[in-house]
Image: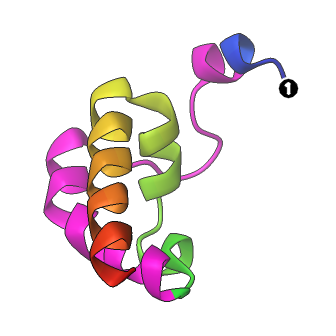
């Protein structure tokens, strides 16, 4: 699906608020980096990260930091 259309239509499943996202982001990234199914553990997080530029940027920064610490 076209990225613009997907963003316009919004998430097809559950989605977190920004406050909920920031509360769960550390755990979500740790699960991702460890290879665990983070999307199953934190439902709605992926949809929020894809639809919210601020939270998506925070996720990418945190993931890079955590992944770099493990290298």
Q: Which residue is mark 1?
A: 1
Left or right of 24? Residue 70 is: right
The structure residue drawn at horizontal position 46% and vertical position 56%, both measured from the top left corner, is: 44
Residue 61, compared with residue 66, is above or below; it is above
Query: Outermost residue toward the right?
Result: 1
The quarter of the picture where residue 63 lies is bottom left
Residue 37, compared with residue 21, is above or below; it is below
Q: Which residues are magenta?
A: 6-34
Residue 54, compared with residue 59, is above or below; it is above
The residue lying toward the viewer, choosing from 52 and 8, is 52
Measured as percent of width and height from the top left, residue 55 is found at: 29, 38
Residue 11 magenta-drawn? Answer: yes
Instruction: Give the overall secondary structure of the magenta segment.
Output: helix
Left or right of 41? Residue 64 is: left
Measured as percent of width and height from the top left, residue 23 is found at: 14, 61
Classed neighbour count for the residue bearing mark 1: other residues with Cα under 10 Å, few (<14), some (14–19), many (≥20): few
The structure residue drawn at horizontal position 46% and vertical position 88%, both measured from the top left corner, is: 34
The structure residue drawn at horizontal position 52% and vertical position 45%, both measured from the top left corner, is: 47
* Color encoding of the figure: rainbow
The quarter of the picture where residue 64 lies is bottom left
The quarter of the picture where residue 53 lies is top left
Measured as percent of width and height from the top left, residue 27 is found at: 27, 76
Quarter of the image where the N terminus is located? top right
Measured as percent of width and height from the top left, residue 33 is found at: 45, 78
Q: Secondary structure at mark 1?
A: loop
Residue 43 magenta-drawn? Answer: no
The residue lying toward the viewer, choosing from 32 and 65, is 65
The structure residue drawn at horizontal position 57% and vertical position 27%, both measured from the top left corner, is: 10
Quarter of the image where the C terminus is located? bottom left
Query: Outermost residue toward the front?
Result: 71
Residue 36, compared with residue 6, is above or below; it is below
């Amino acid at each position: 699906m076209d990225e613009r259309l997907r963003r316009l239509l919004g998430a097809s499943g559950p989605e977190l608020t920004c406050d909920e996202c920031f509360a769960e982001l550390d755990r979500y990234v740790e699960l991702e980096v460890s290879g665990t199914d983070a999307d199953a553990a934190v439902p709605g997080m992926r949809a929020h990260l894809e639809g919210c530029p601020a939270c998506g940027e925070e996720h990418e920064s945190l993931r890079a930091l955590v992944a770099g610490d493990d290298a």
